[in-house]
Amino acid sequence: MLLVPCPHCGPRNATDLRYVGEAHPRPDPGTASIEEWRAYLYLERNPAGWLRETWYCRSGCRRYFTLERNTATNEFRQPALPGNKVGGRA
């Protein structure tokens, strides 16, 4: 069982959440090329190590949140609280 630390509800079973994917900045719609949109929509780095991810809490608070997870060990860093950057660091 994978416990994911929702910043609003606390630790939740991963089956109570939905993994959305890597958290990366969206390209500017006014200036982005087709290649930039393709990379944003379809390409993921998928490294072995720390990765910023977006999750959706579907059985609790029903909110999206971003946190860091080590993809090799499934260890989570402190989730971002509302209004703070990832890791709880202001």
Image (cartoon, grey):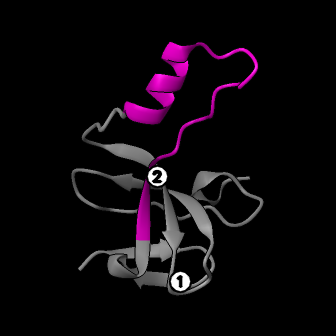
Residue drawn at 49 percent across, 14 percent down = 35
The secondary element bearing badge 1 is classed as strand
Q: In this view, does 49 lie above or below 84?
A: above
Q: Is residue 74 above or below residue 62?
A: above
Asked if the stretch drawn in magenta spans residue 25, the answer is yes
Q: What's under tag 2, amino acid-wise? A: Glu
x and y percentages locating residue 85 in the rendered image: 67, 51
Residue drawn at 47 percent across, 34 percent down = 41
Q: The N terminus lies in which quarter of the figure? A: bottom left
In the image, taking residue 30 as reference, residue 57 lies left or right, namely left
Q: For mark 2, what is the residue?
A: 53
Q: Which of marks 1 and 2 is nearer the N terminus?
A: 1
Q: In which quarter of the image is residue 19?
A: bottom left
Mark 2 closeness class: few <14, some 14–19, many ≥20 residues within 10 Å: some
Q: Which span is picked out in magenta?
A: 18-43
Mark 1 closeness class: few <14, some 14–19, many ≥20 residues within 10 Å: few
Q: What's under tag 1, amino acid-wise? A: Gly
Residue drawn at 52 percent across, 45 percent down = 23
The secondary element bearing badge 2 is classed as strand
Asked if the stretch drawn in magenta spans residue 53, the answer is no
Q: For mark 1, what is the residue?
A: 10
